[in-house]
Amino acid sequence: MGLIEHQEAGAAVGRNSVTITSTAGYKYYTGSTPDFKRTFILLNAAPSIYPSRVRLYMNSSSRNLISEISRSFETKSINDYVGLIADVSFSANGNVAFGFDPMLYGASLDPGYKIYYTIETPGNVANSITFSTFLLEDELESDPTSQYSISNRRTIKIQTTTLPSASRYINSASIVSASSGATKITTSAPKSYLLLSASSFPNIASQSCRVRLYSIPTTGLPQSEITRSFSELPNTGSGLIVDFLMESGSIKVPFQPISFGANVETVLTSQNLLDTPVSNTIYYIVDSLESAASQHNIEIDIYSLED
């Protein structure tokens, strides 16, 4: 399955327009809408009133955090648990659509698949913001009897052995869990995907760790990349997709921004992704940050674009 099967089963995939509105009398107007659908790319945005500011979130808890509601546009320090998709300030002299550069991925982590927002407008007047998007995931549910037999929303489960303090675990994942109608199944890891959120399990004791995902086999990484500290910049050509710190807990940590991942291991031999079949494998490194021996278990939620 993937984006093609999602579309062939009848899902709307392509350009879309979404307008959100605020009413007068609110300094921070908050609302939600299902109109963005479930997963999308932001292309541009334009308000009816300049200047103004709008923020989009993956879930209600991110939008409703007190420190986040009152956070100024200039403050770039954002809580790790805040699923911020976009924060746009429209200048007084704008009067043109703001183009996202680079374009941003958006996805709902809400059970009802809503996107949550906050709108600020001087004078607390009513405002409307229209977004142009490219829709990737419609509201269509997976159906084992249709082209879209397996949901594109998948979960990678990474489980290490019991690691000594400050040790490293290197492995790969080729199986993920997904839904097929009302049934949970295991299926092959996608070749291209979006990283949505991550969490640790089970929540018995603190299991802090560092997780890295790669687009090429870890056997092809230089030793300097494998031993690189979190504060150091990655090596050029390392194939690094994402590098993040994880603590034990049931709260999902949204990826902000949402990141694109893909297997590109064929470039190591042919320099051409179309030359040979690309495998359904995701490569990873887990570094234990615990002072005692511990096992690390991480769930990473993804959206499959290509199987």
Image (tube, rainbow, N blue to C red):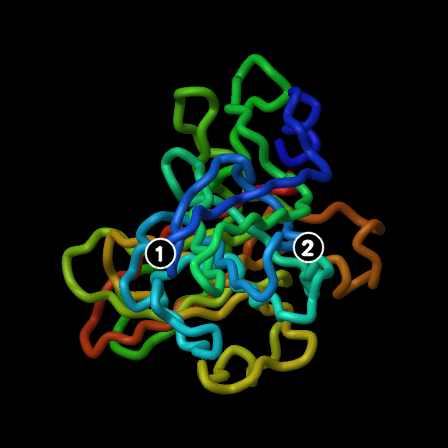
On the picture, is 43 further left or further right than 245?
right
> Which of the two residues, 172 or 24, is positioned nearer the viewer here?
24
Mark 1 falls on what kind of element?
helix
Query: Which of pointers 2 and 1 indicates the residue nearer the eye?
Result: 2
Residue 202's disc is none
On the picture, is 289 further left or further right than 255?
left
Residue 44's disc is 2
For residue 205, say whether it is visible: yes
- For the point 75% across and 65% down, the residue is 268
Mark 2 falls on what kind of element?
strand
On the picture, is 184 further left or further right than 272?
left
Q: Position of residue 139 (x, y in %)?
A: 53, 28
* Marks 2 and 1, the one that precedes in the sequence: 2
Q: Position of residue 129 (x, y in %)?
A: 58, 50
Image quarter in which the C terminus is found: top right
Tell me if residue 98 comes above or below residue 237 in the rendering: above
- Badge count: 2
For residue 255, say whether it is visible: no
Looking at numbered disc 1 in the image, what kind of residue is underneath it?
Ser
On the picture, is 177 further left or further right than 64?
right
Q: Position of residue 9 (x, y in %)?
A: 65, 20
Picture quadrant where residue 28 is located: bottom left
Residue with the most extreme top position? 145
**Marks 2/1: CA–CA distance:** 22 Å
The residue where tag 1 is placed is 62
- For the point 69% across and 33% down, the residue is 13
Residue with the most extreme left position? 204
